[in-house]
Amino acid sequence: DREGFSRAVAAAMPPAWRADTENVLALLGRVGGRWVRGQLLLGASVFLATAIGLTILTLLGFSEFGQFTLVLALIAGVLEWVPIIGPIVAAIPAILIGLAISPVAALAAAGLYTVIQQLENHILVPKVMGDAVDLHPAVMIVALVAGGALFGIGGVILAAPTVAAGRDLYRYGFHRFGGQ
């Protein structure tokens, strides 16, 4: 109920502030919504790539992966939301299943997850998240490092939307107080 929340917050403000309050809340909602949609797209992409990769491993003779393909892909897609450690944690069950089959299967699973993450991190994330929050990849990297250094894993997760929201708030304030 974003509209109801925005109206309630704006109504609690002095009349002179209401228009700005509504504009700022709309701006924050837009940035947050675009970031969430970007994260969902990345999670779905990792889910699909993992499902396809595990299906290929199943066809190559590691049939035990076939029983767990959807569960492992779902874990990988969901843990995509947790930067850095999420993909590592998502790979552990697949590697353990691979170890139950053979050392070669475990290496194949580790290789699959590594390839998926490298492709995702170097191709998909800069494009999807850069478009979602409209930030240059270099700014994204600096934001991730600073967010992680200052606030840990939560800072890494919220770095992109926080920087994008800060940029948009600055632009709004600049135009608002500049008479535009």
Image (tube, rainbow, N blue to C red):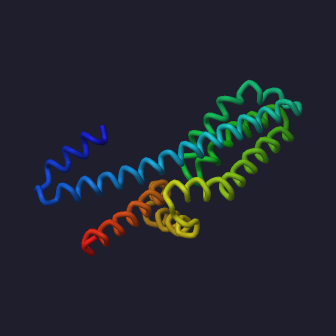
What is the count of numbered marks? 0
- The residue at the point 25 percent across, 42 percent down is 5
Q: Quadrant of the N terminus?
A: top left
Horizontal side of residue 109 vs 124, given as left or right: right
The residue closer to the viewer here, 63 or 116, is: 116
User: Which residue is farthest bottom?
Assistant: 178
Q: Is residue 92 above or below residue 147?
A: above
Q: Quadrant of residue 65?
A: top right
Looking at the picture, how far across and down is residue 109, in whole percent?
Answer: 77, 41
The residue closer to the viewer here, 8 or 63, is: 8
Looking at the picture, how far across and down is residue 88, in whole percent?
Answer: 64, 48
Looking at the picture, how far across and down is residue 82, in whole percent?
Answer: 54, 48
Q: Quadrant of the C terminus?
A: bottom left
The residue closer to the viewer here, 126 or 61, is: 126
User: Which residue is farthest right?
Assistant: 61
- The residue at the point 74 percent across, 33 percent down is 97
- The residue at the point 63 percent across, 47 percent down is 87
- The residue at the point 47 percent across, 46 percent down is 36
Q: Is residue 21 above or below residue 66?
A: below
Looking at the picture, how far across and down is residue 78, in whole percent?
Answer: 56, 39
Horizontal side of residue 33 vs 100, given as left or right: left
User: Which residue is farthest top?
Assistant: 67
